[in-house]
Amino acid sequence: MLAGYSTVSSKAKIKGLEKIDRLFNTYANSSLGMIDPEGIEALCSDLGVDYTDVRILMLAWKLKAEKQGYFTQDEWQTGLKALGVDSLSKLKKALSDLEKEVEKPSNYEDFYTYAFRYCLTEEKQKSVDIESICELLNLVLGVQFRPQIDSLIEYLKVQNDYKVINSDQWINFLRFCKEISFPDLENYDATQAWPLILDNYVEWMREKHS
Amino acid sequence: MGCENIEFDQGWGEMEKGIEKLKRILAGEKETPFTSREYMTLYTTIYNMCNQKAPHDYSEQLYDKYKETLDEYITSIVLPSLKDKHDEFMLRELVERWLNHKIMVKWLTRFFHYLDRYFIIQKSVPALNEVGTTCFLNLVYEDVHPTIQDIVLSLIDKEREGDQIDRALLKNALEIFVEMGLGQMNRYQDDFEARFLQETTNYYSRKASKWIEEDSCPDYLLKSEECLKKEVDRVSSYLHSSSETKLIKKVQHELLVLYVNQLLEKEDSGIKVLFRDDKVDDLSRTYRVYNKISQGLDLVANVFKQHVTIEGTAFVQQAEEATSNQASNTPGGHEQVLVKNILELHDNYMTYLNSCFQNHNLFQKALKEAFEVFCNKTVNGSPSAEILASFADHILRKGGSEKLSDEVIEETLEKVVKLLQYVIDKDVFAEFYRKKLARRLLFDRGTNDDHERSILSKLKQQFGAPLTSKMEGMVTDVVLAKEHQSSFQEYLRNNPDVHPGLDFTVTVLTTGFWPSYKWFDLSLPSEMVKWVKVFKGFYETKTKHRKLTWIFSLGTSHINGKFEPKPIELIVSTHQAAVLLLFNASERLSYSEIVAQLNLAHDDLIRLLHSLSCAKYKILNKEPSSKSISQSDSFKFNPNFTDKMRRIKVPLPPVDERKKVIEDVDKDRPYAIDAAIVRIMKSREVITHQQLISETIEQLSRMFKPNIKAIKKRIEDLITRDYMERDRDNSHMFRYLA
């Protein structure tokens, strides 16, 4: 990691990159050579957003961060360059622009899928536990699809069939919110390719409201 | 003559002479027929008048005059003659007048023929023939056709009611309708056929509603066949052929389609009675009659299906009630009867299928669907798959309650295999069958190998190797065991010092083929311990790569009981023997002492002790002598035990395996679904959700019917395990991940 650092420093003739690197160093854990959870928390407080704010997740997406809670120098550089920022105040402004960028239909699905992947902290982990999924759903879809998400989260918490959610089920939650009319669920057809967990959810909903 | 022009009036005067003559002929007056000369003169007159130079070319005037002539004739002669006539007389008059008209037109056309050759083409006006028909149409037909229609219809009605009518007259009258169409059928259809069909419908509707109440089903069918024959005859006699299809369809609809259920479900004469009384002719008639109606057979097949379903379900209910009403002395006796009844039902209806229903696939389907309804019912807690397996087991046991000949056995087994096609949970059947097969092979001396192999091969043929491969292995194991036994005997002969002193036989079973058996950590009596060692020694000379697990619960022992009255040989299970042998060393043992010595679980020990002290044969005395075993009881050898036989079998009732079988099958099904899905995905690479579901169900249909939820769950699992993925753009398509 130290080698990486010195390689970069020899290339950092460009002023902009220098500033980006300096910002990186403010938050990075020097022994690790990357920003760790503590650093991210500090960054959040400086940016004036909560650690659990969805904008941090969006930032991670923009940085294409691989590991949850960590930003490598490469990710930092690429991400901030893509955002066109090199200072904290610029980064703060960029966050609200970032929200709009994510909301663009062409990006949204990508961001949504990324959010799930970001939770796969262990190597070879394929699924995420229900508790985390509920939090993630709330964070990522809660604003746009409040009634659906509230109801779905309620169901996920009471059901016993699934302890974890895989990526296929995850992607279908978004599809469900986008395509199925709510709360009547009239156009939902269980004989189609929806994952079983959503079939069960719809059944539960229909029973509740009959 | 010559080149002089003929004046119009002059020429027309000549024509009029001819026309008057024609009228006289038509009126039936005494008159000579036209000679050639007369004809030529008239023709030539027209010819000349048309070929004169203008303004003496009189073609158009002549054309008009032609029409005028006809109109005048009709107005002055024809119409009056029709005015005061009614009914058949009116009809007759009309037919005659039309005939006459046609003759007149024929002759006039001949005279005026030259106009047809050039004038009508030049001026694009109708030909003389057509003009002729049109005159009649406009002046006569338009006026009278409603009346004529009424008359014709009432005659037809009369005939239907049984009276004789003048068919030739009707034929001629209806031909007028056709001819008035000038090449199209529209006048016939609009002015006659439409109402005719309507009245036909009304007529047969009335008749049907009467007959359906009064007549038996066979009689009604006979009457219907008759009516249809008569209507076809009617068409060929006087209706236009184009009416046939529409007419027959209407009659069939009113008589047969609308009333099919009421007819075939008649309480005293309907289809169920026909079957009951074996009325092959009537059943065949039913098929014949409905076969001619489009989708008619669907209706009959439906009634057939319901009938068979009711019969089969009645048998099922019978079995349920019989068992709950009285305790049968043969457990499962009622279920045996049920299977017999269902087999008989199947035979009967297969015969009818062939003799009355031409083996038509609609009826095959109906039979299949009917059987699928009641062949999947649970009777007294026993699933149909189990009942069928028990039935087969019963037949295959040596000395089944009725000694059946080999042929009858083969036949019956064949029918059992046929019946299995209607059972959905074939894998449940297979598992029950396998368990019972194990007991037959191990405990039932003298099982008939031929029969066993024969039914297995029939099952394999119908349902595929997966169903029977393990069972075939079991049968082979037992055959091999006999061979091993002789080499074991040889081994003992060659190693006399190893011989434990008592005869024993070991059957080695291949683990994968046989059902899984509970393994007991039984503390063996010392005699038996020796046996195990000896056999192990022998077995290791044969192969070093296999591990032997001893299942003593499947073993049988012969023990000599030295009872005071007389010694008796006891045939018991090895577990029972282990209990009894304890009493060689101690006179009295408490329950807990036995537990300690044998190391068996309570459930199992209680069963054993019960069989030896509280059941039919009391080999041991129990203190206190209550009917059931409690953990505080004590046991003593019963020296006074006796029986009239010198050798008795002390039965140990088997544990109810039903729950375990169903559990085991349920556990295996997800794997079968997985395998099927992977197979399909591998060969298709990309597939829609619907297709995947339907192909999976099809692939597994020989073993069981998976529900959609179960399949979806496996798809989910396979996605998580990266065997397949959902297509990014088409959410209803899946892709195989190699």
Image (spheres, coloured by chain):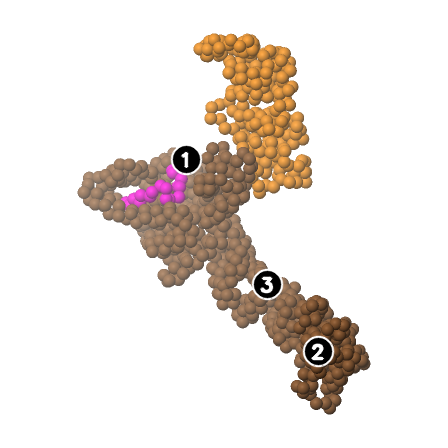
Give the left or right position of residue B52, taking residue B719 as reference. Answer: right
Q: Residue at horizontal 40%, vertical 41%?
A: B516
* Chain coloured brown in this rendering: B
Residue B737: x and y in percent read 46, 35
Amino acid type of the residue tagged 1 in the rendering:
Ser
* Chain coloured orange in this rendering: A
Residue corresponding to mark 2: B48
The mark nearer the N terminus, 1 or 3, is 3
Q: Is residue A126 visible?
A: yes
Count neighbours of disc 1 (C-alpha within 10 A) and say few if under 14, some if 14 to 19, many if 20 or more. Answer: some
Residue corresponding to mark 3: B294
The mark nearer the N terminus, 2 or 1, is 2
Q: Residue at horizontal 69%, vertical 88%?
A: B33
Count neighbours of disc 3 (C-alpha within 10 A) and say few if under 14, some if 14 to 19, many if 20 or more. Answer: few
Q: Quadrant of the N terminus of chain B?
A: bottom right
Closer to viewer: mark 1 or mark 3:
3
Amino acid type of the residue tagged 2 in the rendering:
Asn
Q: Residue at horizontal 63%, vertical 33%?
A: A177
Q: Are marks 1 and 3 on the same chain?
A: yes
- Give the CA distance from mark 2 to mark 3: 63 Å
Residue toward you, A134 or B272: A134
Residue toward you, B587 or B663: B663
User: What kind of element bears circle 2?
Assistant: helix
Residue corresponding to mark 1: B592
- Give the CA distance from mark 2 to mark 1: 141 Å
Q: Are marks 2 and 1 on the same chain?
A: yes
User: What kind of element bears circle 3?
Assistant: loop
Q: Is residue B191 magenta?
A: no
Q: Chain of mark 2?
A: B
Q: Chain of mark 3?
A: B
Q: Which residues are magenta?
A: B504-520
